[in-house]
Amino acid sequence: MASSPALPPFDPADPLGIDDLLEPEDLAVRGTVRDWAGKRVLPHIAEWYERGELPGVRELARELGGIGALGMSLEGYGCAGASAVQYGLACLELEAADSGIRSLVSVQGSLAMYAVHRFGSEEQKREWLPRMAAGEVIGCFGLTEPDHGSDPAGMRTRARRDGGDWVLDGRKMWITNGSVAGVAIVWARTDDGIRGFVVPTDTPGFSAPEIRHKWSLRASVTSELVLDGVRLPADAVLPGALGLRGPLGCLGHARYGIVWGAMGAARSSFETALEYARTREQFGRPIGGFQLTQAKLADMAVELHKGILLAHHLGRRMDAGRLRPEQVSFGKLNNVREAIDICRTARTILGANGISLEYPVMRHATNLESVLTYEGTVEMHQLVLGKALTGLDAFR
Ligand SMILES: Cc1cc2nc3c(=O)[nH]c(=O)nc-3n(C[C@H](O)[C@H](O)[C@H](O)COP(=O)(O)OP(=O)(O)OC[C@H]3O[C@@H](n4cnc5c(N)ncnc54)[C@H](O)[C@@H]3O)c2cc1C
């Protein structure tokens, strides 16, 4: 097709013109989060990652609250009431900085706050949501246990009635934000089925030792939750959640953010590789001039922007109240898998420099190994889609 002077120029940062689909408010949200991450995360993230710490996490949470990023798409109680697309764009920008920062925000907003917002009593919402939206209280979400990950129905953590109180005993594992949380949403087995509990983390019997020696999500707090006779008042239970549908509903919301977020890590790696390919010379010319490098860059760009389009499509469906869980599985399965692939290809373009923390690609690639596993592994999402396609349940 001949080029026409009326056509907009080709933009390597947005080759499909996806920005044309965004409203001015969407662009404003994206710009705010991108600026924040550029100032507050990017200058420090390699050092935090190397140290395996997220220093100043409470301050970061308050700042994220200040820009409306916590519980962003929830309505009322101090939350920003943003659209699903805007929330997704925020996730993308945060994860372009680091998956650990996006995880902090996802767990706070889409898991802990979402659980209270959707399933909590009016009193629970008033007590917790405004402070969580402001980042004054950090939340965590305890579903996974040492022996029960993909199959949480087998959980052993138990809540029993004792007079008017509830008493919780058990262990949770791999819990993001656990050691820095002021409140934990803990899912436990009761005589009536699985229920969610709002657990202030200063309750006697609760502790959250941090999990060390991770090679992924190093700039993110990950913890075990120990519940040893944790006594809670009757009104600590989330009244609207009974059975696994409760936690799975929260996970659906968080997974949606990951569909966007993963593309942020991929975009950062792609941009790094593109810039490197333009400037790094071998055999007397930039490596971006070799066909094999161009094939890699072209394939990366195709998957990156297809993934963003998919995320945008799912966001529009969520905003219209028409997003099915299987569609979220579709997005999470595709986008995280493709994002890892993009990071690994970017790594090859950077050669030896690709393994250095001077560049973000290896950090993103190792982070995405966690993102591939949490919120439902690749295999779980394949099984969700497989069941939806065939009508046959292959989970067990
Ligand atoms: C950094 C990090 C942060 C996390 N944060 C949280 C958090 O905040 N809250 C929380 O509750 N959890 C959290 N998780 C836990 C995460 O959700 C679980 O790790 C995940 O659900 C997988 O569980 P698992 O690790 O026990 O693996 P398993 O369930 O033991 O699975 C191991 C392997 O077996 C496969 N498998 C299992 N069953 C089947 C089957 N039927 N068919 C085919 N393959 C199967 C899985 O796909 C996987 O490949 C986090 C994990 C990480 C790594």
Image (tube, grey):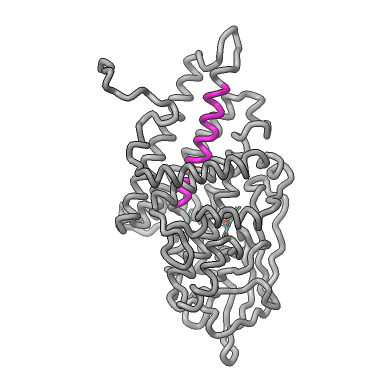
Q: Which quarter is ligand 1 in?
A: bottom right
Residue 162: in magenta span = no
> Does residue 13 lie above or below 23 as drawn?
above
The percent coordinates of residue 228 (x first, y second) are: 68, 76
What's the magenta region? 257-276
Q: Going by the image, does 110 lie left or right of 44?
A: left
Q: Going by the image, does 368 lie left or right of 225?
A: left
Q: For residue 273, which quarter of the picture?
A: top right
Q: Residue furthest bottom?
A: 163
The percent coordinates of residue 5 (x first, y second) are: 28, 18
Residue found 60% across the figure and 57% down from its top: 62
Residue found 71% across the figure and 59% down from its top: 210
Q: How many marks?
A: 0
Regarding residue 305, the answer to whether it shows in the image is yes
Residue found 35% across the figure and 42% down from its top: 22
Regarding residue 147, the answer to whether it shows in the image is no
Residue 267: in magenta span = yes
The quarter in which the C terminus is drawn is bottom left
Of 205 and 61, the residue lying toward us? 61
Residue found 68% across the figure and 39% down from its top: 46
Q: Residue furthest top?
A: 284
